[in-house]
């Protein structure tokens, strides 16, 4: 059939069909083996042909009533769009960026909520401390039994000491895994996840966790084991309790965005807060892994009180250094 | 035919594209496939650890949970990064993550949406599996949590879950480009045995784009070969259509049964050329009621 016999939209299609087919092949290739394995020529053609196809699509929408053609062009352009606009970064680069700048910057920009998280837990700890000296029975109210492990106002001082310095059931990989999924990790996940529900659960949980800490500490002070417990807790607790507070700060950020979105819609505010909140959660997760390592391996190997305190607070200082100095631009 | 949920996305080129939003069901299927894949990986690693005997028996469950965790955290973010918004499960279900603002997916948004998956899916999931009947209040809380998590995408225009909202992404069905032949080119030149059908302008004034495209669909179906039973039914439908068209457009000459297909094809081409020309002049005719719509407008 000669060209003159064709109607306008059919001519339009005939002139461009070979380009579309080539684009379709290139898209298949890009989807199958990835953009970065294509040659320069092919990648350039893909981008060029994609832009031509978008033009064809917008013309076809105006001039053509051929449904087969319209559906094909819609699908082809969409498919090409998805492979042209693929993520450009590599995973390694993003991890380095997070460690060197993104993470510490997020910490610095949300120091207020982080402080709030620490304050919530500290308030709980102080309250718990005074509760215990008011009446030791409070210990049983706040402390979950599986966490106490036999330690309580009824236990002998020798038993308490033996837990602090004695041999533990296991160490190494098993202990590491156990501690990683221990009470504190669960608390950290909850304070983060529940933050989006208007902050209250996060604040309450942080306070409650502080209460547990307070009564536990008061029990040991009562028996004259204050410094020994301090060492036992310090070696991993500095990192672990900080991680809980930081996870709580992330949750509070989400909750505050929902409560006080300001000029934005709640959805946009949640999205904005989400960037920092997720970084805080990642930092908390890293810290929990380190804490589990310290608890699973370090606490067994180091039995001396002073060394335990030094290790715990030394690592805490390293974290602080990272948060304060990481990712600052040289002026 | 019900129109699937379409969503408009504006790429930087400024030509809007329309995607079918993937529903909760197909996404759950993809999620199950992914859980299966990561689970098998975790079990393999676990058996390896058992074989080299480094796992103390009392920590078996904790180690298994840790392995599953270690495998699945990087799996989702890395696979969506490498395969441009698709995990293996999503590839199997032919769905894909896209960025709602029309730009390329960023690594950050992929990491965010997959970390939120921990809080949204795995945490309540593990809770339900681990909790027993005597822990009533935690069970109720986690049940409420799961219901809340499922409710978010169900009552959402783009079926976004919380992680999608925070990351600014949503999930679509991958469109499949199939180039069908142009029906206006399928006309055989007129011969002695086959007359040439001519249509006048007033005969083409009746129909609109909807009828044209319905006819297009029928002609495409007629080209496909089927069994004798279906062939007979198709013949009857074609005769009915030809009759209807002839009556509507006042086509005086009778159409012989063997010419019916040629008649419809010729009519399709003439009608399409006419409607496309009207459209170029700004007169879009959606369907056969266009005259009444014009009067009202």
Image: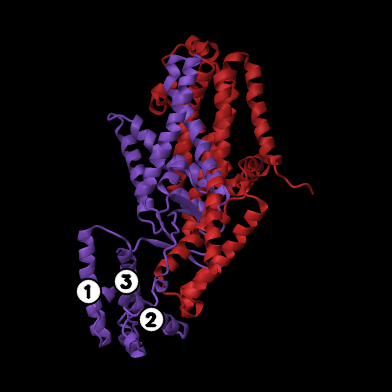
Pick whichever, B279 or A232, lies toward us.
B279
Quarter holding residue A139: top left
The answer to whether the residue labelled 1 contacts the one labelled 3, judged by CB atoms less than 8 Å apart, is no
Residue depicted at 60% across the width and 19% down the height = A298
Q: How many discs appear?
A: 3
Q: Can residue A128 be seen?
A: no
Which label lies toward us, 2 or 3?
2
Question: Residue A65 has which mark?
Answer: none
* Residue B243 point in image, percent of width and height: 22, 79
User: Which chain does the numbered disc 3 sit on?
Assistant: B
* Residue B135 point in image, percent of width and height: 31, 30
Q: Answer yes or no: are tags 1 and 2 on the same subunit.
A: yes
* Residue A243 point in image, percent of width and height: 55, 34
Could you tell which of marks 1 and 2 lies nearer the N-terminus? 1
Secondary structure state at the residue bearing disc 2: helix
Residue behind mark 1: B239
Secondary structure state at the residue bearing disc 3: helix
Residue behind mark 3: B214
Residue depicted at 34% across the width and 32% down the height = B129
* Residue B279 point in image, percent of width and height: 44, 82
Question: Residue B270 has which mark?
Answer: 2
Q: Answer yes or no: are tags 1 and 3 on the same subunit.
A: yes
Q: Is residue A50 above or below residue A287?
A: below
Chain coloured red in this rendering? A
Left or right, residue A41 beside residue B8 = right
Q: Is residue B125 above or below residue B285?
A: above
Could you tell which of marks 2 and 3 lies nearer the N-terminus? 3
Pick whichever, A249 or A42, lies toward us.
A42
Q: In the rendered image of this protein, which colour is used for chain B?
A: purple
Secondary structure state at the residue bearing disc 1: helix
Separation (CA) of disc 1 from disc 3: 16 Å
Separation (CA) of disc 1 from disc 2: 19 Å
């Amino acid at each position: 059939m000669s060209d003159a016999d064709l109607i306008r939209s059919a001519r339009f299609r005939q002139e461009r069909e070979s380009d579309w087919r080539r684009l379709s092949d290139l898209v298949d290739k890009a989807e199958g083996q990835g953009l970065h394995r294509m040659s320069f020529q092919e990648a350039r053609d893909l981008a060029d042909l994609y832009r031509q196809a978008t033009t064809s699509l917008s013309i076809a929408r105006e001039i053509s009533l051929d449904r087969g053609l319209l559906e094909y062009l819609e699908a082809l352009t969409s498919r090409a769009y998805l492979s042209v606009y693929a993520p450009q970064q590599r995973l390694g680069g993003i991890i380095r960026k997070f460690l060197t700048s993104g993470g510490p910057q997020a910490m610095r920009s949300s120091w207020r909520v982080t402080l709030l998280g620490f304050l919530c837990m500290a308030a709980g700890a102080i309250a718990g401390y005074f509760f215990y000296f008011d009446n030791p029975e409070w210990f049983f109210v706040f402390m979950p039994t599986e966490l106490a492990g036999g330690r309580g106002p009824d236990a002998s001082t020798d038993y308490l000491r033996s837990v602090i310095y004695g041999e533990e059931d296991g160490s190494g990989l098993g202990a590491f895994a156990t501690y990683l999924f221990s009470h504190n990790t669960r608390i950290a996940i909850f304070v983060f996840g529940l933050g989006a529900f208007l902050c209250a659960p996060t604040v309450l949980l942080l306070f409650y966790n502080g209460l547990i800490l307070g009564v536990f500490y008061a029990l040991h002070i009562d028996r004259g084991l204050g410094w020994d417990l301090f060492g036992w807790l310090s070696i991993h607790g500095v990192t672990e309790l900080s991680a809980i507070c930081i996870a709580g700060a992330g949750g509070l950020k989400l909750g505050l965005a929902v409560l006080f979105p300001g000029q934005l819609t709640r959805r946009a505010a949640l999205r904005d807060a989400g960037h920092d909140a997720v970084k805080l959660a990642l930092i908390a997760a890293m810290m929990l892994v380190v804490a589990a390592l310290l608890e699973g391996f370090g606490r067994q190997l180091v039995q001396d009180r002073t060394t335990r305190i030094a290790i715990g607070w030394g690592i805490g200082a390293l974290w602080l250094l990272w948060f304060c100095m990481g990712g600052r631009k040289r002026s | 035919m019900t129109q699937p949920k379409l969503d408009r996305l504006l790429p930087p080129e400024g030509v809007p594209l329309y995607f079918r939003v993937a529903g909760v069901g197909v996404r759950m299927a993809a999620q199950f496939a992914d859980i299966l894949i990561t689970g098998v990986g975790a079990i393999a690693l676990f058996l390896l650890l058992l074989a080299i005997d480094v796992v103390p028996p009392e920590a078996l469950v904790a180690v298994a949970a840790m392995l599953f965790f270690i495998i699945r955290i990087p799996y989702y973010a890395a696979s969506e990064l490498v395969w441009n918004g698709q995990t293996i499960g999503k590839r199997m279900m032919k769905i894909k993550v896209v960025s709602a603002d029309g730009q390329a997916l960023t690594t950050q948004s992929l990491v965010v949406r997959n970390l939120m998956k921990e809080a949204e899916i795995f945490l309540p999931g593990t809770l339900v599996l681990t909790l027993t009947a005597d822990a009533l209040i935690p069970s109720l809380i986690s049940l409420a949590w799961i219901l809340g998590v499922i409710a978010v995408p169900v009552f959402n225009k783009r079926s976004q879950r919380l992680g999608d909202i925070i990351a600014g992404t949503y999930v679509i069905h991958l469109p499949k480009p199939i180039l069908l032949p142009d029906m206006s080119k399928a006309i055989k030149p007129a011969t002695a045995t086959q007359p040439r059908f001519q249509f006048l302008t007033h005969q083409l004034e009746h129909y609109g784009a909807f009828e044209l495209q319905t006819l297009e669909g029928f002609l495409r179906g007629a080209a496909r070969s089927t069994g004798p039973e279906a062939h007979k039914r198709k013949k009857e439908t074609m005769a009915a259509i030809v009759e209807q068209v002839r009556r509507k457009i006042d086509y005086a000459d009778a159409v012989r049964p063997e010419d019916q297909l040629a008649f419809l094809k010729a009519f399709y081409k003439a009608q399409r050329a006419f409607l496309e020309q009207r459209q170029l002049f700004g007169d879009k005719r959606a369907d056969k009621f266009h005259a009444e719509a014009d009067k009202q407008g």
